[in-house]
Image (tube, grey):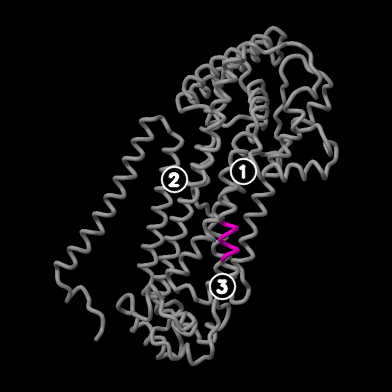
Amino acid sequence: MGEITLEYTPTWIVTVVCSVLVLISILFERGLHRLGEALSKRNKNTLVDALQKIKEELMLLGFISLLLVVVQVPIQKICVDKNVMYHLQPCSTHGQEEVESSSAGAHFSDGISGGNRRILGGDRRLLSGGEEGFSHCMNEGKVPLLSYEAIHELHIFIFALAVTHVAFCLITVLLAGVQMRKWESWEEEIKKHDGNASQQVNPVEQFEFMRKRFEGFGADSFILSWLKSFFKQLYGSITNADYTTMRRGFIMTHCRGNPQFDFYQYMRRVVESDFRQVVGISWYLWIFVMIYLLLNIQDWHLYFWISFVPLILLLAIGTKLEHVISQLAKEVAKRHSAIEGDLVVNPSDNLFWFNNPRTVLYLIQFILFQNAYEIAILFWIFITYGFHSCIMDKLGFILTRLIISMTIQILCSYSTLPLYAIVTQMGSSFNKAIFDDDVRAGLVDWAKTVRKKNKKHRRSMHGTRSDESISTHSQNIDEFNSRRGNRTDDQV
């Protein structure tokens, strides 16, 4: 007996199933809406943007699923030669007879699955029309390009990948926020004692920041300094002295007129702003997915080998960020033997890869996506084909991949992301997350006004600028920086 169509299905069954699906969808949509309202009330605008990004990813996921449903009939009617099915297989067949005798024309027969029944799908027809598409190709002596069952499995894979990626990003940012929480007490302590700073002259080696970051064995050695940076990332590396020194360097560079600037809240807003980019699956990440699917060939153990890539990248990023802090200390040691007052470092883009601190963010996005892909593919294979599927690989490989994934998750949450949050502020420019929409609009208006005044002044002076005008312009900038810092500190 063939599958029953809607023509012969009781209406109450159709109504109940549709009602449940619609109810679940509405509850999910309302839940996201309520979450957005709660974040807006708390002025978490950057997190609202991140939530909007998640909605966009879910919409893309829904569109892909809808597209698969629409094109599954035409795909089923695309016929290819049987010999094509023997190339680039995740699991090898044991003879042409298996493909020829498969009643569904599926890519993975029971023999391919190791003789075990699949947890999802089995050998049943998922949608009516599968037999028709297979018969159409068999009449031509060929097989379908992609079976209905394979399309259904793709649905599950895409859903698992998107959900796992979003979940891993949320967990990482939340755990990093917990790790950064202790910095808030440092911020309050600094503000209380900021006006009591001593102005006496001290040798640079008396500053704790210099002793921890530059002095000692191997300080001048290129290799040893990198090795120290590598191992330092593996434990709580940011100390009170590090935070205080980098905070002071940031304020003296970007908001000199506001020594009470809340650096901790600024960093939190930067991380929340960057989270919007990290949580999305960019187009180039989808390219990696396609490459992984293409090269997932039996006996290549692709997923085992690529599991080391994010771990290596993560260790490289942590080492680089630690080395940036050491370079800040080294630059101070080169310029000064003694310092009057507080120690101040000079932020610079030259300390980072490609002279761009944002490069680290793109690498972190790739690492989190790759790690989520590792877990998603394991979960998908287990649910779809079972634990003993040939795609699942050997137990030793599976355990290694799981250990690496957990290591990446813990190291990124408790070390690398907090390091990124503070060290990337040591660039030459500040992040626009320091401003809300109103302040950014005011900054743009102020810049336009200054440009107009400069144009009028150049016309009146025939292209020359006097010393008096330069001094006045500098005073205007200092005045704006002071007002900007005070206003931002109140809003943050």
The amino acid marked with disc number 2 is Lys
The mark nearer the N terminus, 1 or 3, is 3
Q: Which residue is mark 1?
A: 416
Q: Which residue is mark 3?
A: 393
Queried whether the magenta region covers residue 325, the answer comes back as: no
Which residues lie in the magenta part? 399-405
| Quarter of the picture holding the N terminus | bottom left
Q: Which residue is mark 2?
A: 53
Mark 3: secondary structure: loop
The mark nearer the N terminus, 2 or 3, is 2
What residue is drawn where x is 51% and y is 42%? 175
The mark nearer the N terminus, 1 or 2, is 2
Relative side of 490 to 59, left or right: right
Contact, CB < 8 Å: mark 2 with mark 3?
no
Mark 1: secondary structure: helix
150, above or below 34, in the image:
below
Name the one closer to the observer, 280 or 302: 302
Instruction: Classify mark 1: residues with Cα within 10 Å, few (<14), some (14-19) or many (20+).
Output: many
Q: Tell me the chief SS of the magenta region.
A: helix
